[in-house]
Amino acid sequence: MQKLKQANLYRSELIPISGKLVERYNKCLKKLGFAPTKLTEFSIDGIGYSPEIAEEKGTTMYLNNGEANPQAIIISPLQKGKPVYSPFHTFDREMMQQVFRVHGEKINDITRDSAICIDFDQNIDAFYEPLDVLKYDKVFIKFHLIDDLDIVQKTQQDLVDKFKKGTNFIDEILHAKLLESAKTYGDLRGRDLSLHSLQYQTNSFYTKSFGGVYVLRDFISSIVVFEDLKWHKEAIKDTAYDVMIFHIEQPELMDKLRDHVIIEHDLEVALNTKRYDRIKKMEFALALKDTQHPINDILSKDVLFKSYLNKLDIESRKRIMGVELYLQKLEVSNQFKIADIVDQNMFNALHKPHSSLPTHHQDLIWKLLINVSPRDVLFLYWYDKEEFYKQYSKWDASFKDWVIETISNNI
């Protein structure tokens, strides 16, 4: 991952945490019901997730009390606008943007000497069946301060009010309580520590629950797509919901998405795009074996590209160049079918969200498409960084150079 770090493509926007902030973070973990970290230095993203702590605890979901109860931690105003590196839902970043938009000034004040624990409450205590994800509706965003600072503030104010009454100003016990509170927490009287709950309305989304599930419910009819085959098989037994259920590898899924005007394709237009070039070159790179030149050079130099393309077996060549072959044949006759000439993975990879979809839906469908056929390294990096990093670790060193250069030139 060192090359990615040098190119600022690996965890480049994380916030470093050390010293007093570690103590506050651990207080949040304890308040949320988790064991504290033993790390003295780590980094966090916009939702308070730390890759280092996830590695320590052996799970990326260490901020979850079960799959139905994700949580967040705010210990710095610098988290505002930061990416969410391991989102449990595709709407996690939107919820954090709402939090800072509404409570930004108070967060700046509170995090001077405290931290905020956030509970994303869907009014679902636990999941029991895979289609329970359809119960997602409104998410109530609730806030809790470490050391119960808001409660301490009320207690401190009550002590001050009592001090002002009658002759209580000579009460030494009352003096001691006020001094102890002030030394421990400071003067809280003039601070606004109240963070009222917020409400977020869900629509279509992706969740990591049950091995990964897409819930598409703002279209002609509701569609649920499972990444995990076991949970897909379990879901199709459930007849309580009127939804269409697919596994992400089912060919029928793409047909249904096209029928419901969720995705579209135009191979002739796609042919002249950078995206097609990236997809074709990735397919080519995956087919190369025992090369005498660096893969980066083969993909970047036309002479080497043609040389190695002609060294491949005929089936591999047809798979890589299938789109161009199909369009050439189409100029002669319209009797040819895409499925007869174009590789299914290549064809799937060249789809895009339908142009009629709003932006937030397009982002979700891009993520779905890149998970159906992860052939575009740039879009894989944009829409599913976790999967990108997994695949990156398995690639040839020279191919990694091409990937880094490709992403860097398009950001």
Image: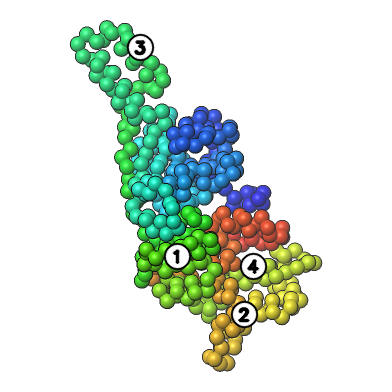
Crowd tier of the residue under label 3, counting other residues whose Cα lies within 10 Å: few below 14, some 14–19, many 20 or above: few
Residue reaching furthest right?
292
- State the CA–CA distance, disc 3 to disc 1: 66 Å
The reply to whether callout 4 and callout 3 are in contact (CB within 8 Å) is no
Q: Taking 123 as reference, is 262 above or below it?
A: below
Q: Is residue 53 left or right of residue 243?
A: right
Q: Earlier in the sequence, mark 3 or mark 2?
A: 3
Asked which secondary structure carries label 4, the reply is helix
Asked which secondary structure carries label 3, the reply is helix
- State the CA–CA distance, disc 2 to disc 4: 14 Å
Point out the image quarter for the C terminus. Answer: bottom right
The reply to whether callout 4 and callout 1 are in contact (CB within 8 Å) is no
Residue 100 lies in what quarter of the image?
top left
Three-letter amino acid code of the residue under disc 3: Ala
Viewer-closest of 79 and 177:
177
Asked which secondary structure carries label 1, the reply is loop
Q: Earlier in the sequence, mark 3 or mark 1?
A: 3
Q: Taking 295 as reference, is 132 above or below it?
A: above
Q: Earlier in the sequence, mark 4 or mark 1?
A: 1
Q: Residue drawn at (22%, 8%), measured in percent from left and top?
A: 167
The reply to whether callout 2 and callout 1 are in contact (CB within 8 Å) is no
Q: Residue drawn at (43%, 51%), measured in percent from left and top?
A: 127
Residue 378 image offset from top left, x and y in percent = 57, 62
Residue identifier under label 2: 322
Asked which secondary structure carries label 2, the reply is helix
Three-letter amino acid code of the residue under disc 1: Lys
Q: From the viewer's perspective, is the residue at label 3 or at label 1 nearer?
A: 1
Residue 363 image offset from top left, x and y in percent = 45, 62
Q: Find residue 176 and name its label.
A: 3
Q: Find residue 237 and name its label.
A: 1
Q: Find residue 282 and name its label.
A: 4
Is residue 64 among the parts visible in the rendering?
yes
